[in-house]
Image (tube, rainbow, N blue to C red):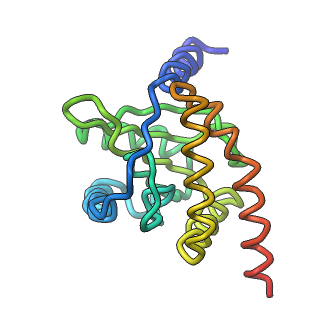
Amino acid sequence: MTEATNISLKRIDELASEPIAIVPYSPEWPLRYAAEEAHLRAVLPPELCTRIEHIGSTAIPGLSAKPIIDIQVECTDLLQVRRVVPPLMEPLGYEFIWRPTMGEKAPHYAWFIGRNAHGHRMFHVHIVEPDEATSDRLLFRDHLRAHPEVAQQYEQLKQQLVAAHPADRTSYTHAKTPFIAEVLRRARALVSR
């Protein structure tokens, strides 16, 4: 491994141990997303970064969540993103991490963390090449939006997991995987009808 890779993995470990907080849904979240999407569209090269979507729990009306707006940006060339985009995002206060994936086909992706003046995470921008995982994130979001009872089950699971893993984001995320996989299975079955 290169020194840069070692530093990146060490930073990811540090980030994974930051405390997790689940808070009630806020109607401010879609507004914060819309404002940040506008900033990103003004900064990111449109020929490189082609689609921007609000993903994650803050994109589901009524769902409690970590108060961090997750944004998925689809790109045409991830290696070009790695060279071109960090200098564009850093003036906006984003920290850049070239991190191993958790589902994308490529071995790494561009992850940007935006924080407020107090150091709290406000935004996660995931820049990825389109693949099944990017489609699944949108399918999961749309299914929960259309099925509030499933969103409620997801909220209950997240509350249990944050109690079990209050400062272990990796375990928290992995423990949600079976639920997410089952929701995606059901959502795909409905789409294929």
Extreme residue toward the bottom, this view = 193
Depth order, front residue of 54/8: 54
Q: Nearer the viewer, residue 4 or 187?
A: 187
Q: Residue at x 51, y 41 (%)?
A: 110
Residue 74 pos. (x, y %): 52, 59
Position of the C terminus, as image quadrant, is bottom right
Q: Is residue 53 left or right of residue 143?
A: left
Residue located at (69% from left, 38% from top) = 174
Q: Quadrant of residue 165?
A: top right
Q: Residue 189 in the image: x percent, y percent?
A: 80, 77
Q: Is residue 88 above or below residue 72?
A: above
* Number of marks in the rendered image: 0
Residue located 67% across and 41% down the image: 102
Residue at 56% x, 31% y: name it. Answer: 169
Residue furthest left as drawn: 117
Q: Percent position (x, y) of residue 21?
A: 42, 37
Q: Nearer the viewer, residue 125 or 165?
A: 165
Q: Residue 138 lies in what quarter of the image?
A: bottom right
The N terminus is located in which quarter?
Answer: top right
